[in-house]
Amino acid sequence: MTIHTSEDQGQIWTAIVARNRDWDGRVFFAVRTTGIYCLPSCPSRRPKYSSVEFFSSADDAERAGYRPCKRCRPEQWGRDAAEFRRLMEILLDQQEAVSSVEEWAAAAGISPVFLLRVMKRFTGTTPKRVIMEKRNNDLKELLKNGETISASQFAAGFSSSSRLYEKAVSHLGMTPRKYQNGGAGERIVYDFLNTPLGRMLMAATEHGVCSLKFGEKNHELLKELVCEFPAAKIEQQTGELDLWIEQLNAYFSTHQRIFEIPVDSHATVFQLLVWQELRKIPYGEKRSYSEIARSIGKPKAVRAVASACAANPVAIINPCHRVVHSDGSVSGYRWGIDRKKALLKMECDESKDHN
Ligand SMILES: [Zn+2]
């Protein structure tokens, strides 16, 4: 992020005073009187606002002549974040059952002390506690794994209210935020697009696109958005979405294959895992529901995968249209099977032209 407005600075300072860990890595603060820079979560005493300076990276702070704090180790944040991500991947890996701190450290090839440090930094708790949380989730799932449960119950069972899980997944490159109270306090901007397959509405929070949907009429699309986020402040965009809309237009006209568009998801952890997997399917290719289930380490969750695809709020960017039945037959698209077929055909024709 770039920090220039006083509004940004006020928000950052509030986070620093609250020692808000969520801001670690996004901003670094330096104290002119001591020459030291810290992470927002640093336990050290807070300086006067008038003597702080903000940086968006540790390197920037060092270039400005500041030294890293010995308590919060801001210069190691980036490396530790990568390590945290790797550690959570090992823990969440269903094949590799990790049941003790020692096993976890050994599986990662690091010392238990280092494991403790990284977990403390990113979750505020111990590795032991993290394993317990993981186990509780497994247990819930196990109990739900009866034959009579529906796919949606399964998916719901996997979703966890645990902050820890959210943190973990958030460090895995997603933003699972819950829009409690229908988006209260959120500002959502939207705009309409004309595509060869009909009208679309794109809507975004300050974190990224939260909705991209096909429809027939503007007012119907807008009504749907308002129903989804009844308490949010919803406004037509004034340029904020232009770059992303341009990419969507390029997808339809010149067949741009890759999007650089952040997604702000309102979802369960299970849905996020599925949607992230969708984004790995290359343009012009298809996967089956069972392939997706296998690749997220839930081979039996085929129906839950199908439900997660059906619940996808961000068409095309989360390319749920690239998921078909194992026999190749196309069914089930939230915005009509004809649109799904048309998207697949467009991508397939275009890929052939290139090969
Ligand atoms: Zn510090």
Image (cartoon, grey):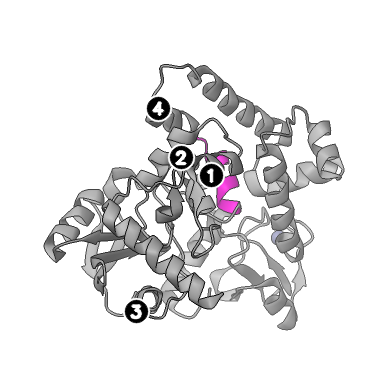
Write down the residue under mark 1.
Answer: 292
Pointer 2 and pointer 4: residues touching (CB < 8 Å)?
no
Label 4's element?
Answer: helix
Residue depicted at 75% across the width and 60% down the height? 79
Write down the residue under mark 4.
Answer: 153
Vertical side of 196 occupied by 266: above or below: above
Write down the residue under mark 3.
Answer: 242
Task: Give the percent coordinates (x, y) of residue 1.
Answer: 53, 73
Vertical side of 344 occupied by 248: above or below: below
Pointer 1 and pointer 2: residues touching (CB < 8 Å)?
yes
Quarter of the figure with the C terminus: bottom right
Task: Give the percent coordinates (x, y) of residue 354.
Answer: 53, 77
Q: Along the polypeptide, which appears first: circle 4 or circle 1?
A: 4
Residue 353, visible in the rendered structure = yes
Write down the residue under mark 2.
Answer: 305
**Count of numbered marks:** 4
Label 4 neighbour load within 10 Å: few <14, some 14-19, many 20+: some
Q: Which residues are magenta?
A: 161-171
> Which amino acid lies under the numbered mark 4 shown in the image of this protein?
Gln
Q: Along the polypeptide, which appears first: circle 2 or circle 4?
A: 4
- Depth check, mark 2 against mark 3: the one in front is 2
Pointer 2 and pointer 3: residues touching (CB < 8 Å)?
no
Residue 352 magenta-highlighted: no
